[in-house]
Amino acid sequence: MRGSGSRSARPPGRRAEKGAATRQAILDAALDAFSAKGFAATRLDDVARGAGVAKGTIYVHFRDKETLFEELVRAYLGPLVGTLTASQPTGLSPRAFARAIVDVFVREVLGTRRKDVLRLGLTEGARFPELAQIYYREVISKAVPHLRLVFGAAHAQGALRSDALARFPHLLVAPGLVAIIWDALFSRFEPLDAAALMHAQIDLIFGPEGDA
Amino acid sequence: MRGSGSRSARPPGRRAEKGAATRQAILDAALDAFSAKGFAATRLDDVARGAGVAKGTIYVHFRDKETLFEELVRAYLGPLVGTLTASQPTGLSPRAFARAIVDVFVREVLGTRRKDVLRLGLTEGARFPELAQIYYREVISKAVPHLRLVFGAAHAQGALRSDALARFPHLLVAPGLVAIIWDALFSRFEPLDAAALMHAQIDLIFGPEGDA
Amino acid sequence: MRGSGSRSARPPGRRAEKGAATRQAILDAALDAFSAKGFAATRLDDVARGAGVAKGTIYVHFRDKETLFEELVRAYLGPLVGTLTASQPTGLSPRAFARAIVDVFVREVLGTRRKDVLRLGLTEGARFPELAQIYYREVISKAVPHLRLVFGAAHAQGALRSDALARFPHLLVAPGLVAIIWDALFSRFEPLDAAALMHAQIDLIFGPEGDA
Amino acid sequence: MRGSGSRSARPPGRRAEKGAATRQAILDAALDAFSAKGFAATRLDDVARGAGVAKGTIYVHFRDKETLFEELVRAYLGPLVGTLTASQPTGLSPRAFARAIVDVFVREVLGTRRKDVLRLGLTEGARFPELAQIYYREVISKAVPHLRLVFGAAHAQGALRSDALARFPHLLVAPGLVAIIWDALFSRFEPLDAAALMHAQIDLIFGPEGDA
DNA sequence: GATGAATGAGGGTTCATTCAT
DNA sequence: TATGAATGAACCCTCATTCAT
């Protein structure tokens, strides 16, 4: 590993590598802790223990608890933006397009720890205006108009009986969000299959599979 | 002032009346405070100030902060349960029935402070297992099967093209819940009309107005 | 003490009395602690222990450590202002007037715990701009011009050979201040009699006793 | 770079030179920081940044923060001792001798950064007993008796009307010290000319210029 | 010698809760 | 029932100091 044959790059450096690893360990532990107990109830002591570092080390990498939280959300949700807006309806039926979006959501959010971060965003977001702003700017304000265009065109061409999805593309993901929240509240009484719920919504919108 | 000499009629009595009024003032102030800052960030000092009482007085009426929160949710959401489960499809089309439910939700929840309490339930519920349990037992476990029956029958009779709503009646209210959360996060950037969103969902499910 | 005979006043009230006593106990303990260790090195734990209260109690009476410090200085030095500016030279020779001022200083400052507070003001004042401002406004800006007038008149009438004291009345108290600082630094090696030092300064200015 | 091959002349050596420069840079930065914020409020981080070195480097040159502070005072005030005690009254009038001392103080202390270090000694000295001891041993215990002798002789010869200066030579420098403190507290409201203050003191003691 | 990430003890501050009045 | 001063446990954050590189 000491340059192991490659004549190149030391730039990141041994120290910097270590630093980045520590930072990531803290983010991971923070995700666990914040997910389990929420922002306020999470003690930095726990995060430190979870990351295997001293409490002070957190402050080497993050200004304060709030910043740690915000960078956590950013780190996990940021990369998602590109993926979502990359979806192109090229040659896809409205149903297939909607289905593709839902599948991305199922795979990239519900199937990963991103769902935990997203839940944090939903439940704690009101207390982090700046976070909400970033999220709105980066995700919402890009995705919603994009979907409006696509579904608006489909409706105009008669491929969609209702213009509801064009006016409120939110409806495509709403079930997924509710499922995430349900999971935190009621899963011990009655699990709710988020993917199935989202697919059911598609069935509702476009009729049962093989219909249209 | 002691009511001495007053016939002291009416069992609740002046004192009790006063007590009840104080209790209600505290609940009101608590709703304001918890709605604005969440459970953890709300200081009982603020609640006391908002209610115009001393901090200690809160403890005359509620065992602790958690109990105050739970009783707040119960006080606001409890009465709703009866209303919801009272809805009978007698002689209504599936669409009209769904519409009736949504209208109740719009009127009784979105149109009142209950929406704030519901939001608190959604965002803080994970940290209050007992609350979630009560809510599940009182509302969810009654409403969901009820709706399943109704929409299942409608589907069996061909009045609903998809069985999705029978399997996941959640979809009827999901948009309303998402709108409530949206409001807390993004209303300053882009308001979202919760009622319109719920109606759009009905359009999606049953086709545009006047369709089916 | 329970209203001891006086039929009157409960206004301060038992509770308020207690509160004021606690507040004073904290101020006293703070004076001990700050004097002994300086502002930064003083732990609020020590102040609390010294006052016989819990640490949190300090925050019932003072916003924070800084405020505690400032109110301490104000409480001890404030009342002094009136005394100082009350000195009137009516019918006194310059020497007698100067001597009177020095005597007030010796009695009211050097002879009381005010000297400790004054020392705190001198050594910590640079870090408390607001405190310096108050002290300048309340004491300096009143005393200096007052003394300038008096000694200026004395010089004009030939009662003072030099106009130095008119230009720099500071010189009257300077030895006292230096003695206070000396005490904190060198008293264990060689005590310095502050009163004697101030009187020696008067001798220097006006000639030995019985001279002028 | 290892000096290998270099004649490696001059004992201190390149490395040592570099080391000494670093050490001096740290002392300079420390003076700035301690002067501005006092001992306790100064962070070694700031000193390091000011010196353009890493925090750890400070510990290469100084055992700890306290040592850094003490060596700072010693480095700046040490050389002064010789200068002060070198003053000889040979053939000078008491006034001229006093004036010479004051002039040295004005030039060597007030006119240099030594005044900042001296202020630090005055305001922080109580928390550094060892420092006070050194200062007492090196400066005070030499200067005071020396001056006592000189002014005592002058008084005995009738060249000084009062023996005050013989008993308390402190009075010669006291105004300078007060001016230094004033500067830190009140210069923004009303500047005080330290040199003029000291000269006024001489006028007070010996009569106006050209008098005696 | 120089670095800077990591440490961890320490202390200021908050706030739910208690209780004497 | 109402009060509000007092409590003390809990927790965030700071920063002098260390040490592997």
Image (cartoon, coloured by chain):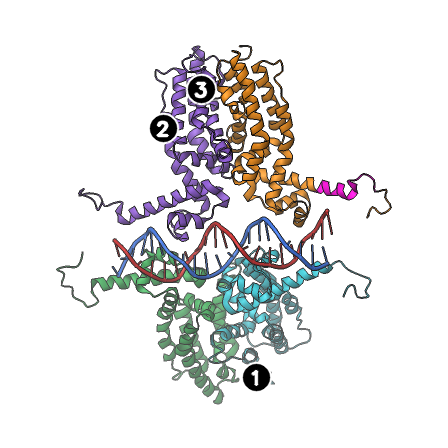
Chain colours: A cyan, B green, C purple, D orange, E red, F blue
**Residue at (87, 46) in percent of width and height:** D5
**Residue at mark 1:** A208
Residue A141 visible: no
* Image mark 2: chain: C
Residue situated in front as seen by the camera: B48 or A139: B48
Q: Mark 2 points at which residue?
A: C83
Q: Alpha carbon of mark 3 to alpha carbon of mark 1: how far? A: 106 Å
Callout 2: 10 Å neighbours few (<14), some, many (20+)? few
Q: Do the residues labelled 2 and 1 touch (CB within 8 Å)?
A: no
Discs 2/1, front: 2
Magenta part of the protein: which range?
D8-22
Give me the C-alpha separation between circle 2 and circle 3.
20 Å
Q: Residue C202 carries which label?
A: 3
| Residues marked 3 and 1, same chain | no
Q: Which residue lies furthest to the bottom in this view?
A: B156
Which residue occupies 56% across, 65% down? A49
Dots 2 and 1 on the same chain:
no
Residue C74 is situated, as x and y percent measured from the top left of the image, at 40, 37
User: Viewer-nearest of labels 2 and 3?
Assistant: 3
Chain of residue at mark 1: A
Q: Position of residue A56 (x, y in %)?
A: 58, 57
